[in-house]
């Protein structure tokens, strides 16, 4: 039988993290202490911390203190967006969350993977985009390289491995379009 993967051959590509090891460790310490230890209502403070580490954060963004952001310099969040409790933004690659978009509690956005077709199992950064006015509901997994269209809804506990068209309601594992999204005036 041939080898499928040989982790002794794995090497981290130069510059993959886009920051030095000291900056990465400083962020992880900051996140574990100041970010997580901040009061629930300290949204401005958490926005400030993320911006200090290179994140592009819009106005009035709500990010809960229990959210985990791997590399803030790979994060862009538009105005009035929400990131819920225990959300993981595993942003080895860029993660962009549009204006007025919601990523609900316990969702996991995974912007990186490994090339399993190569024996040295190289790591890859693969960007994720959550469009404007989209809603990623509770406990959703969004896979590497996925784009969720503007105004789309991804239902609770869905697993998203392919792009989701804008203006649609979707759910399931794997996630599928259920219908068009409709709204009524307030």
Image (tube, helix red, strand yellow):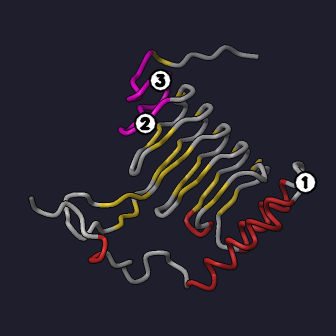
Q: CA distance from mark 1 to mark 2?
A: 32 Å
Which residue corresponds to the image point at 52% horizontal and 60% vertical from the top-left? 91
- At which x and y percent is residue 161? 37, 39
Residue at the limit of the structure toward the front, as seen here: 1
- At which x and y percent is residue 107? 59, 41
Q: Earlier in the sequence, mark 1 or mark 3?
A: 1
Q: Earlier in the sequence, mark 1 or mark 2?
A: 1
Establish if 31 lies above or below 175: below
Categorize mark 1 by other alpha carbons within 10 Å: few (<14), some (14-19), many (20+).
Answer: few
Q: CA distance from mark 1 to mark 3?
A: 33 Å
The residue that disc 1 covers is 39
- At which x and y percent is residue 7? 31, 71
Q: Earlier in the sequence, mark 3 or mark 2?
A: 2
Q: 143 or 12, which lies in front?
A: 12
Q: Is residue 178 left or right of residue 76?
A: left
Q: 89 or 117, which lies in front?
A: 117
Q: Secondary structure at mark 2?
A: strand
The residue that disc 2 covers is 160
Q: 33 or 81, which lies in front?
A: 33
Q: Secondary structure at mark 3?
A: strand
Cβ–Cβ under 8 Å for marks 1 and 3: no
Which residue corresponds to the image point at 87% horizontal and 59% vertical from the top-left? 38
Which residue corresponds to the image point at 9% horizontal and 58% vertical from the top-left? 1
State the extent of the magenta-drawn residues as a range: 158-178
Find out whether residue 137 is within the magenta segment: no
Quadrant of the image occupied by residue 72? bottom right
The residue that disc 3 covers is 171
Categorize mark 2 by other alpha carbons within 10 Å: few (<14), some (14-19), many (20+).
Answer: many
- At which x and y percent is residue 60? 79, 50
Q: Which mark is residue 131?
A: none
Which residue corresponds to the image point at 70% horizontal and 52% vertical from the top-left? 67
Q: Is residue 115 left or right of residue 111?
A: left
């Amino acid at each position: 039988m041939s080898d499928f993967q040989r982790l002794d051959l794995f090497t981290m590509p130069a510059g993959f993290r886009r920051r030095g090891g000291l900056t990465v460790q400083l962020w992880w310490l900051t996140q574990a202490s100041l970010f997580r230890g901040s009061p629930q209502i300290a949204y401005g403070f958490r926005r400030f911390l993320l911006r200090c580490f290179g994140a592009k954060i819009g106005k009035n963004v709500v990010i809960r203190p229990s959210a985990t952001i791997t590399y803030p310099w790979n994060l862009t969040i538009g105005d009035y967006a929400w990131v819920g409790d225990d959300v993981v933004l595993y942003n080895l690659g860029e993660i962009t969350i549009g204006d007025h978009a919601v990523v609900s509690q316990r969702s996991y956005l995974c912007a990186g993977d490994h090339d399993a077709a190569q024996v040295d199992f190289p790591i890859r950064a693969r960007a994720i985009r959550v469009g404007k006015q989209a809603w990623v509901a509770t406990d959703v997994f969004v896979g590497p390289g996925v784009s969720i269209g503007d105004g789309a809804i991804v239902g609770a506990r869905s697993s998203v491995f392919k792009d989701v068209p804008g203006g649609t309601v979707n759910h399931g594992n794997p996630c599928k379009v259920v219908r068009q999204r409709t709204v009524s005036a307030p």
